[in-house]
Image (tube, grey):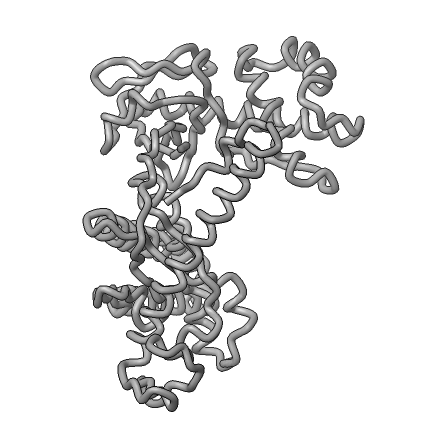
Amino acid sequence: MKLTLKIKLLPTNDQAALLLQTMRVANAACDIIAETAWQEKIFNKIKLHHQVYHPLRSTCKLSSQMLIRSIAKVCDAYALDKKTKRKFKPLGAIAYDARIMTYKPNNVVSLWCLGGRQKINFVCHKPEHFALIKGEADLVYKKGKFFLCQTIEVPPEETKGVDDFIGCDFGITDIVVTSDSVKHPADGLNTYREHRQKVRSSIRAKTDTSKRSTKRNCRKLSKRLQGKERTHASIMNHTIAKAIILTAKQSGKGVAIEDLTNIRFTSKRRNKKFRTKLGRWSFGQLRLFLEYKGLLYGVPVVVVDPRYTSQTCNVCKHIGKPANKHFKCSNCGSYMDADANALINIATLGGAVNRARKSNAMSCTIAHMASGLKPNPSLRVVG
C-alpha cells in the first residue's frame, strides 16, 4: 500500500533562497513545455521528450534529471485533461527522485538545487518509515515552510475472515456512532468551525471598510489562517478512524459503513444553515481513512446501502417509521432508540455483504478451475 510521508525541511536562509529559485525555474520550464505540448498536440511523454529536451537543456539552468521530471509533470497534468492548456504556479511543487535526492544519516537530505547539491536538515515524526521509501518525493512550499512529500510502500496485514461487524453511522450532531455504543461527538469541531467563521467574517468586514494598510494586513492574516479548519477536521477524522479500526481488530470484527455518496443531493432539508453544515461534513474523507486503515491493519471494511436502515426493525425486518428518536415496530412490538436500531441494521448488512463477497469470489475461483484456467489472484477471498 502506497502512503505519503510528510517531511519538514529546516533550510538555512541561503538554502531556502536556492530552493525557491529552483522551484521558479523548474515551473517556468514546465510552462514552456506545456506551451509546446499544447501547440504541437504532443501529450506522450517519450515524444514530448524528443521535442523539447535538447532545446531546453541548452538554454535552461536545470539539470538533466530535473528537466526530465518537469516533462513528466507536464504529461501528468495533460493526462487529466487535454482540452485545457496547462499553466503552472511559480512556486508549485516539483518532483525529486533518487538521482537528484539522497537521504543521509542524522536527519539530513541532499537535494539538487541551481547552486549545486545542498545538504538540508529535516524533522520527521515517523523515522522508522524511511526503510519503506519507494518512489519520488514532491518538494512543497507552503506558508513559508518547505516539505518533502515522500512516497512509501507499507505492507498491509493479511485480512482475516470475520463473521461480526461494527456498524458505523455518520452524522452531523455526532461525527460517527458505532454499534458497540461508542460516540464521537462533533461538538468540539462544530464550535471550532463557528469560531473560525466569525473570524473570517470579521476579517472580511474590515477588508471592505478599512484603510489600505489595514486591508493589506487583513489579507495577510486571512492567508495565514487559511486551511486551519480543514487541517483540524482531518486530524479528528484520522484519530476517529484509527480508534474504530483498532477496536474492530481487537474484538475480531469488521467495520460496516453506509454509502453516503449522493447525500448532499438527496437531502430534503434546504435551509441555508443546514446546507452550510452539510457542505462542511467531511464524511467522504472519514470513509477514505477507514478504508485505507482497514487495509493497513487487516480489518475488512464493507460499504452497505443506507436505504431503510433507520426504518427497518432489526428483529423482524418489518419496515416502519421512527418517531421522536425512537423506533417502535408495529409488527413485533420491538421498542428501542432509532439510532441503535439503525446501527444494528448496518452491522447486519455488513455481514450479509461480506458473505456475498466471499461467495462470489469462491464461485469465480471454482469456475476458473472447472474450465481448466488458473485461478485469478485478484479474486482471492478477503475477510
Indicate the position of residue 20 as horizontal and vertical percent values.
Answer: 44, 27
Indicate the position of residue 63 as horizontal and vertical percent values.
Answer: 53, 11
Indicate the position of residue 318 as horizontal and vertical percent values.
Answer: 42, 81
Above or below, 362 against 167 in this view is above
Q: Nearer the viewer, residue 49 or 202?
A: 49
Residue 217 placement, left or right of 239: right
The N terminus sits in image quarter: top left
Query: From this viewpoint, is residue 12 visible?
Result: no
Q: Quadrant of residue 28?
A: top right
The C terminus sits in image quarter: top left
Indicate the position of residue 203 as horizontal and vertical percent values.
Answer: 39, 64
Q: Nearer the viewer, residue 96 or 217?
A: 96
Q: Going 44% across and 64% down the picture, which residue do you hit? A: 207
Above or below, 78 against 164 in this view is above
Residue furthest front as drawn: 370
> In this figure, what is the number of numbered marks?
0
Q: Going 46% across and 58% down the picture, which residue do you hit? A: 212
Query: From this viewpoint, is residue 330 visible?
Result: yes
Q: Going 24% across and 31% down the picture, which residue do you hit? A: 126
Residue furthest right as drawn: 40
Q: Nearer the viewer, residue 192 or 315?
A: 315
Q: Quadrant of residue 339?
A: bottom left
Q: Going 41% across and 59% down the picture, which residue do you hit? A: 352
Q: Nearer the viewer, residue 374 or 350?
A: 374
